[in-house]
Image (cartoon, rainbow, N blue to C red):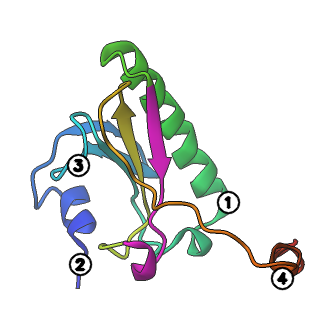
Amino acid sequence: MSTVFEMIIAGEIPSVKLYEDDVCIAILDIAPKAKGHTLVISKKVYPTVSDAPDEVIAHMFSIVKKIDGKMRSALKADGTNVFINNSPASGQEVPHLHIHIIPRHEGDGLSFFPPSIKYDEGEMARFGEQLRI
């Protein structure tokens, strides 16, 4: 079964394309968090960032960088949120690698992160040991 992104890439579902090459496509999100919210989508299906080759991720982020610059110049964005929802537990709705770029303006009222939590005594060091590469 094709993902919605595969259908967009194949031209079966209309989209507003901002960029396209052999590796990825950039389109406006149809359910934006802010006007100009863009998705950079890999053309080949990789369910998560861990499944994608490093060169694909690097290329996609080079496009993210260009779109970020365009948002700052054309939309006068004060900043951007750039993120990947990676697996359903993180909120990923389509199992196909895509990067969100959301233009932000001072005082826009958008918030994407829950409140910070605290580590228990010694817990941060244990997490460090588990996650060190």
Q: Residue at x 26, y 64 (%)?
A: 5
Where residue 124 sits, quadrant-wise, is bottom right
Q: Earlier in the sequence, mark 1 or mark 2?
A: 2
Q: Earlier in the sequence, mark 2 or mark 3?
A: 2
Amino acid type shown at disc 1:
Asp
**Residue position marked by numbered label 3 in the rendering:** 29
The residue range painted magenta reads 79-91
| Residue at numbered disc 2 | 2
Amino acid carrying label 2: it is Ser
Secondary element type, mark 1:
helix
Which residue is nearer to you in this view: 14 or 111? 111
Indicate whether 49 appears above or below 70. Answer: below
Query: Label 3 amino acid?
Result: Asp
- Secondary element at tag 4: helix
Q: Secondary structure at mark 2?
A: loop
Image position, residue 119 (x, y; %): 73, 73
